[in-house]
Image (cartoon, grey):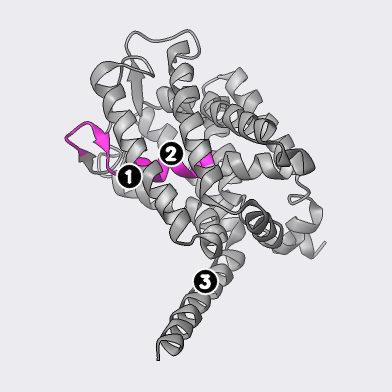
Amino acid sequence: MGDVATAARELTRTDVERRLETAIRDNRFTIAVVFPVVGATLLVASAEGLLPEPLSYNPLLILFGTLVMRSPLVVGLLPRIGRWAVGCLGVLVVYTYLIEAVGVDTGWPYGAFEYTIQLGPMLFGEIPLALPLFFVPLVLNAYLLTLLVLRGLADNVAARLGTAIATVVAIDLVLDPAAVAIGFWAYLPPGAYYGVPASNYVGWLVSGTVAVVLVDLAFDRTALLERVHSCEFVLDDLVSFVLLWGTINVLYGNWIAAAIAGAFCVGLLGTGRYDREMLRTVVPSVASR
């Protein structure tokens, strides 16, 4: 009976995973392109005072949009998330809350900063409850991109971890200037890099190192790569990230940050996933030409 029950649970999980994958594939363009473009438009309009109060910085819209854009990554990795991965990622979630709480209260390691809008419900009025939703996928994206770009060199622990950590910091070189520009948070005093101090990147080096090590421990790399190679949409969340925050940086003239976002585009193209053949499967108008 135990074997039958286990098989039934596995069948149910497999069926759910397949249904989710179909939903992502059928809506790739909407998720990876439309949502970030609309999101960038709404956030800039909020920052510039162009939206009425119910829509301006609406936390439910922010959380919903983030969840939708994260869905390709979550669904893509779901078959490789077992108990061990859940445990490692659970530790990462706890760590994310702890280091953010220390950062808000003490200014270490990121520098003194404060949230200037509510990104959904706030723990103790200071930390977004959805913080892991914002941070952990960035680390996962950096790690997956590293594996694909390094290829065989990813077998070297130092090269793999070092590149992934550097990629996490590079992601924040795109994210933080745009987030400051639209008023998500502010540094006191403002830093030289579009309002962001150098201490913030020292902090991301610290937090990114811990996060990358935990992600590296969470997965069997061979099985993870097999899944990444077979799942064409697993990096679409990174596409959304580049479109959303890259667009905001361009609109506010944060040209270095925008150029780094462009470098991520080159990295994504280097994976061989985002070529004309992919566009034919995503955008019907391209297929008909």
Residue 112 point in image, percent of width and height: 31, 15
**Residue positioned most to the right:** 289
Viewer-closest of 19 and 162: 162
Q: Label 3: few (<14), some or many (≥20) within 10 Å?
A: some
Viewer-closest of 105 and 65: 105
Amino acid type of the residue tagged 1 in the rendering: Ala
Residue 79 lies left or right of residue 84; in this view the side is right
Q: Are marks 2 and 1 in contact (CB under 8 Å)?
A: no
Residue occupied by mark 1: 130
| Number of disc labels | 3
Amino acid type of the residue tagged 3 in the rendering: Glu
Q: CA distance from mark 3 to mark 2?
A: 24 Å
Residue occupied by mark 2: 135
Q: Earlier in the sequence, mark 2 or mark 1?
A: 1
Amino acid type of the residue tagged 2 in the rendering: Phe
Residue located at (22% from left, 39% from top):
122
Residue occupied by mark 3: 17
Is residue 177 shown above or below 52? above
Q: Quadrant of the C terminus?
A: bottom right
Q: Earlier in the sequence, mark 1 or mark 3?
A: 3
| Labelled disc at residue 74 | none
Is residue 216 shown above or below 79? above
> Judging from the image, what secondary structure is the residue with disc 3 in?
helix
**Residue positioned most to the left:** 124
Residue 241 point in image, percent of width and height: 55, 40
Residue 115 at least partly seen: no
Per the image, is 134 magenta?
yes
Is residue 152 shown above or below 282? above
